[in-house]
Image (spheres, rainbow, N blue to C red):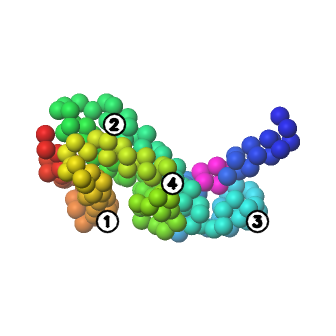
Amino acid sequence: MSVRERKERERANRHQLIVSTARELAESDGWDAVTTRRLAERIEYSQPVLYSHFRGKREILGAVALEGFAELTDALRAAAAKAKGPAGRGTVAALARTYTGFATDNPALYDAMFSLDNGLPFAEKSTPAPLQEAFGVLRDHLADHAHPDEPGLFVEAFWAALHGLVTLTRAGRLPAERLPDRLTLLVDRFVSR
C-alpha cells in the first residue's frame, strides 16, 4: 500500500469516526450537545482536524442524515421482501411499520434526516442518491395505487402522513399506543387493494 493510499484510508476512517461519534453523542445527549469542540475532545483530534473534514455542524448533520437514509432504505427493502398478506396492502403496511419503527428507534438520527437543517436538497435534481433511493423504495411499492400521472405526489403524501404520525406521536400529541391503529387506517386509505 502506498503512502497516499494509507493517508486516504486514514482520512476516510477519521471522517467515519466523526460521523459515528456525532450520532452517538446526539442519541445520548441531543443535537444541542454536538459541538465541534465536544466532538474534537471525544475523538481526540483537534478542532482544525474536524474542520478539515466538515465546515461545521450542518455538514456533520448532512453526513449523519445520508447514513440514516441509507439505513432506512435497507430497512424498507428488507421489510418489503419479508412482507406477508395481500400483495399490495401487506407490503405497504410493512413499509409503514418499518418507517415509523425506524423513527422511534433512532430519534436523533431521524431528526438529522428530517427536522434539522442538514443542508441536503430534497426533491431536486441534485438530491443525493441515498435520499432518492429511500423515496424510490416507497414509490416502487406504492405506484400501483397511485394515479399513473402522479405517482410521486402520491408517495409524497404517504411519506408526509407517516412523518406527521411520527412527529405528533414523539411530541406526545398523539398517544403512542394507538400508532398501530393509525397506520392501519393510513394504509387502508392509501392502498386500493
The circle on residue 79 is: 2
Instruction: Give the image location of residue 54, x and y in percent.
Output: 66, 62
Which of labels 4 and 1 is toward the front?
4
Locate the N terminus by quadrant.
top right
Judge whether 88 appears above or below 66 on screen: above
Judge whether 114 appears above or below 103 on screen: below
Q: Residue furthest front?
A: 149
Q: Secondary structure at mark 3?
A: helix
Q: Residue at x 50, y 62 (%)?
A: 120
Q: Residue at x 49, y 68 (%)?
A: 117
Instruction: Give the image location of residue 2, x and y in percent.
Output: 85, 38
Mark 1 or mark 2, which is nearer the start of the sequence?
2
The residue indicated by pointer 3 is: 48
Contact check, label 4 and label 1, Cβ < 8 Å: no
- Highlighted magenta segment, given as a residue range: 16-21
The kind of residue on which mark 2 rests is: Ala
The kind of residue on which mark 4 rests is: Pro
Q: What is the C-alpha distance between the residues marked 3 and 2?
A: 42 Å
The residue indicated by pointer 4 is: 128
Mark 2 or mark 3, which is nearer the start of the sequence?
3
